[in-house]
Amino acid sequence: MADSNPTADWNPLGQVYYRKFEVYAMQWKDHVDLSRSRSVAAPFGGPIAIIRDDKKSQKQSSAKMEIQIFNAAGAQIGGIKWEYAGRLVGMGWSVQEDLICILDDGSVMLYDLHGTFKRVFSMGGDSRGHRVIECKVFMSSSGSTGVAVLTGNYQFYVVSDVSQENARIRHMAQTPGLDRPPSSWVILPEDRVVRVLIAMDSQLFLVDSTQAEPMSPPVNAMPSSWVSMAVSFNHKFLAMFGNNGSLWVGTADLQNVYCECNTNATEVPHDLVWCGSGAILAHWDNLLFMVGPEKDWVKYFIEGNVVLVPEPDGLRIIDNCVHEFLQKVPDVVEKVFKIGSLAPGAVLYDAMREFERKSPKADEYVRSVKDQLSEAVEQCTLAAGAEYEPSRQRSLLRAASFGKCFVASYQPTQFVLMCQHLRVLNAVRDFRVAMPLTHTQLERLTLPVLIDRLILRRQYCLAIRICDYLRLPAQQGASRILAHWACYKVQQSAVDDAEVARAIVTKLRDTPGISYTEIATKAKDFGRQELAIRLLDFEPRSADQVPLLMKMKRDELALSKAIESGDTDLVYTVVMHLRESRELADFLMFIRGYPQAMSLFAQYCRQQDREMLIDLYYQDDRLVDGANVHLLDSLKDKGWDFQFQKLTKAQEMYQQGQNRFAAEVAGDHLKLIQIQRQLQERTDQPFLGEPLGDTVHKSFLYNQAPVAEKLRKDFKIPDKRFWWIKLKALAESRQWLELDRFAKSKKSPIGYEPFFEACLEHGSRVEAMKYIAKVPAASKPRCFIKCKAWEQAAEAAFAVRNDEALDQILMKCGPGYGSLQERIQEMKAQLRQKY
Amino acid sequence: HLSNGRVDLGLLRQSLRAEFIECLNQCDGSKALVWDDKLTGPFSLIAEYSLLKAHGVDKMYPLRAGSLPSCEMQHIIFLTRPKLSNMDMIADNIRDAAHDRLKEFSVYFVPRKTMLCERRLEELGVYGNLTHIEEYCLDIIPFDNDLLSLELPLSFRECCLEKDNTSLFYVARSLMTIQALYGTIPNIHGKGPCAKLVVDMISRMRRESPSQGPAVMPQIDSLLLLDRSVDLVSPMLSQLTYEGLLDELYGISNTAVKLPPEKFMSQDEEKGAAAPVPTGPKLITLNSGNELFGELRDLNYQAVGPLLSRKAKRVTTQMEERHEAKTVRQLKIFVTRLPHLQETRQSVSTHTSIAELLKEKVFNDDFMENLRTEQELCAGVDTDGAHPFVEMLIAKKAPILKVLRLICLQCIVNNGFKPKLMDYYKREIIQTYGVVHLLTLDNLEKVNLLHGKISPTFNMLRKTFRLTVDSVDEVNPQDISYVYSGFAPLSVRLAQHLSRPAGWRSIDQALRQIPGPLVEEKQSLPAGLQLKKSQNPRVTLVFFFGSEEAQSSDFSKGTASEEED
């Protein structure tokens, strides 16, 4: 092949060349007859859907139809048993490679490329009542797939993106005078608007959702009716065929005309399609008639019926036996291979061939283009990309490789990328994969989409190898593919759960970022609960895992997984779900088994529902905690009866819960509030709820000394503390006499310095001075200093040889005490002597 | 000031800011923010008012029950902790203003949206009124160049008492944030149940999201997680560093302290003849952005005075230099230094006032007596019976916190109380402070701050870790024990041991004596990011769960430390 003349299949069309070559021999050769069926194929080497045509086969039994789906090489990959009452009006493929079926009742069904039903939506409006009579599937300018229908009352409805659920359905404006089917119509997507070009005989209207605008393109030989129209793949050009045999080619806005040529045909062509954007083909029985922009034309003879699939850079022609590709010979290929071409690429190619023949001419050739060598290498590289035949790709790449040896500082990126892409392309062009993509198409499609499409075709292994080969990150590549593989795997109902789970886990173990939840959801949707649960066990993201477990009613598992995660919000989610789905008693029993969940629920109750909190503690045998709640509640309310009741309850529960100490405390407090009630009545002062100490304190303040004494006895208040309380209370109420009596009642357990301090604090220096006598000698200086009794302080300090205190006095007493200062200096001197 | 530490925490702040701005930009129109009180402090460290203003925030209100003050703003944004009680207030606010059809409402949860709160909003019937219900992940907040905090003041209570580990989840998440910014931390050590849980969560989260964007060169080589329960002694002691005392006596929150204004009037308003009436407490921001505070913060209070007077002298002499400046050139040099000098003089004067305030409080009998008692207890003197000083405090009805701190301290150093002593203390407290403290005491027992006799461990710890140090030089400290004038916190000792070459291996025995699981884990680093035998000293991130003090944050060379409240 490599040596065969690369220009052998070139056909000149005016200044340029077109070539047509075989892509696949169709495997459906003996099963499918295109002339007896309707067929529709997806662009970018996509699948082909075929349905036996009821018009052609003369049978009206639409009920038992079957849609068959083939790959580009004619192998069947799916089928749909048609069981709907509605008549199928049209089909098409979306960019996601979903098969779109439009029914006459206005419903639009989506199937994947294996014929699995995905979803259905309705075109709404009049489509149901008036039936859909015609429809078209189109690609919008944003790259999404749209559907347009014409209803029986001649209204147009358009959806511009079928992949969106709830996509908006637009009603197109009324076309004036449209009271019968238009002679032809076509969708003109432009930016974000979708317009319909409608031909009513020779009249043209451009209709959008607001208005219908009559159009008058420049036409020389006006036909009486435009019977066929076609828009190029890039939406820029329009072709119209008139019933007088004239073919009009111009811009899509109908402003400019490129050519108008008369085909002399009287019959309406079956089809009018663009080949890329440079030529238009009309299809009659056994004939394809190609017209270029300069009225040049080429005829191709064909056998039987064909499917014509416009591609961005050409046209696929599929018949009963072969799948061919018709394209304009790419410029760069033309440069390299055109006979007599002197383009640097061509020279380099020849040089390489001479080199292989070990001919010195090679050197001569290379020298002749030595200034253009990088361009030559680029041309050979790009030409390799544009060639379909691997052997020819190879020789072109060899030429490029040969040439780049002579280029100083060559940037190899383009060359390396091209090699990589060609390797991928050749792999997917294999008839078992059947994606006959050209390099141009791959660049438009992008690699990630190619991987997606391989996944759709269940070519998992190839997809992963490609990802590995191209070193795509795992997240985009291998992980994603394996996840899809696993989703597919769980649908194989023949294999048992354990086996599937094992197979999946072994394969996915080392792959990061796998969502087991997604796979498990698939399994669950497929009715395989057990498998779903097995798989979910491997899900590292609890936030995904737990909700699904709850959906499958695996409450225990959901709760323990939530707890394991440490995410308390997740635990709450399960707990609240349980609370709602179960009886209270049942719920409390259940949650007992999970201490963390229990404490979280308790936390919730503490804020929201105290009754529930007590129930909860009771159920859990946490009587002391329950009692604590009662105790706390008792303190909130100022009403005596309420307090009494709550406290009694708390005391009971402390007893039941065997907390002897707390029960005693509660009991004591019960006693206390009873006394407090009496005190309140007697003194008209608030006592309720005060601590015991304060109660005693206030009893002294309000002349209830006997009650205070009783409290002391009843509650066994230790001596020291009682002395402190009484002392402070008496000093505070300035009952100096009483205080004096108290001090003398017996030897103070707390010493007499507190008496001194208390008196001083409450403003009686005189009273305070009284008690200094009883204070231990060591503390006396400090006390006198506090009373600012400097002389006495000095004496006391001297007595206990406190040099530091003497210094302090010296500093503090101030200038008025000259003699004292002298005396202190003396004292200090004496002290020093003695040591 | 965040960026001049060993690890650039400014980066964290930047990323938090950017995220916040993104949140604001999500909401259209002029905005009014309604703040959960708990959040104003933390947010002040992230975004200042001018930033908010620049992004369309015109009004701010505190979140209160009832109705919002009427305002013109189009979009009302609530910023709240995920607390149910806040939801009620938000619902109140919205219901009241919802009649205005032009207004939009959004709720941003900090640090995360919870199911309970969302449900609550639904139950209250305002869920549908909300334009955005999102979360703003402000979990860890940079306080200073070596200090971060989660600002969850109740976490100790929630984790240890109520067994609600929500805050631990936040901790784990924040550690993931840190690792995303500063690289995976290869070594993790931890002690205590919380530490264990958090380490488990971190490794779980790592599994959940294996690849998080571009790998970052690790800047932190080890992480130390310490439960408060490991070292319950130090929070019971009075803090004695400059910053610690300020916190102890006035309370530092979000790096700012409120002080009585009188002390500051004279200096600030020296020239104004009629000094304005002090309006409220003076708010002083404390962070190492202030050079002087940076030097002072970790000094023992006894060392503060000398340093301040040295500084004051130096400033004065430097100011005097202007008289010596003779040539124009010399004058010029002086003038360029002037702003810095004035600033220094100002801050010396501020801190001198603060130091005076502290001195008044510190040099009185009560504080000293308290301190002596603490030190005696730590040294193991007189720990077996009822302590007379404690008895006296109770009898005088001193603040209960002070009393409980001492009792808990005594309990720990005494390896628990005999039942008789326990009941005696409890009864004394209940009788003096009220029956409600039966619950307080019960809670203290639940978190193990009070307990019955246990096998003696404290003495062992004291010896192994040299917790008490006899001769301490507070002014020129050689050992960390200076912070408590003779007592070294166990947590710090643990961190010190970790930074030694032998790590924790040498103290394995002792570590096992401390209750709570011991965690040691290595996290594998992405290929190519292994630390080279670094020229730089190692950086350790220390995480305390439920810490209450602002003390001892930097203890060994090159250690960025961290606290979590």
Image: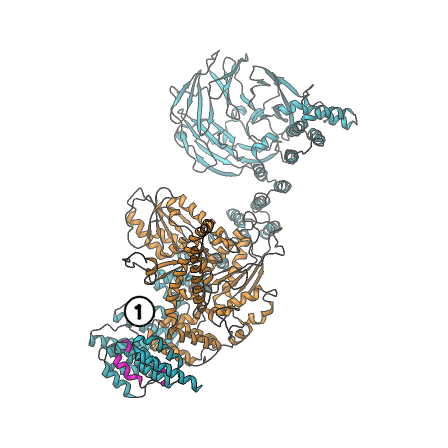
Colour convention of the picture? by chain
Instruction: Please identify the quarter of the rendering in which residue A654 is found.
Output: bottom left
Quadrant the N terminus of chain A occupies: top right
Q: Nearer the viewer, residue A52 or B403?
A: B403
Residue A141 image point, x, y percent = 48, 29
As for residue A576 lying within the magenta part, the answer is no
Image location (x, y in percent) of residue A806? 37, 80
Chain B pictured colour: orange
Side of A212 where B227 appears, left or right: right
Q: Quadrant of residue B351?
A: bottom left
Image coordinates for residue B132, horizontal then vertical, percent: 39, 46
Residue occupying image coordinates x 79% and y 27%? A358
Q: Chain of mark 1?
A: A
- In which quarter of the view is residue A71 placed? top right
Residue A84 appears in view = no
Residue A727, relative to residue A629: is it above or below?
A: below
In the image, is residue A777 part of the stretch drawn in magenta? yes
Residue A485 vs A807, above or below: the answer is: above
Camera-side residue: A517 or B377? B377
Circle 1 residue: A635
Q: Magenta segment, which residues?
A: A760-780
Q: Nearer the viewer, residue B269 or A126?
A: B269
Whole-percent x and y of residue A57? 54, 25
SS assignment at label 1: helix
Q: Is residue B144 above or below residue A152?
A: below
Q: Is residue B119 above or below residue B401?
A: above
Neighbour tally class for label 1: few under 14, some 14-19, many 20 plus, Cα within 10 Å: some
**Chain A colour?**
cyan
Residue type (three-letter) at the residue carrying disc 1: Leu
Examine the residues drawn in magenta and state their main secondary structure: helix
- From this viewpoint, is residue B555 visible? yes
Q: Nearer the viewer, residue B304 or A581?
A: B304
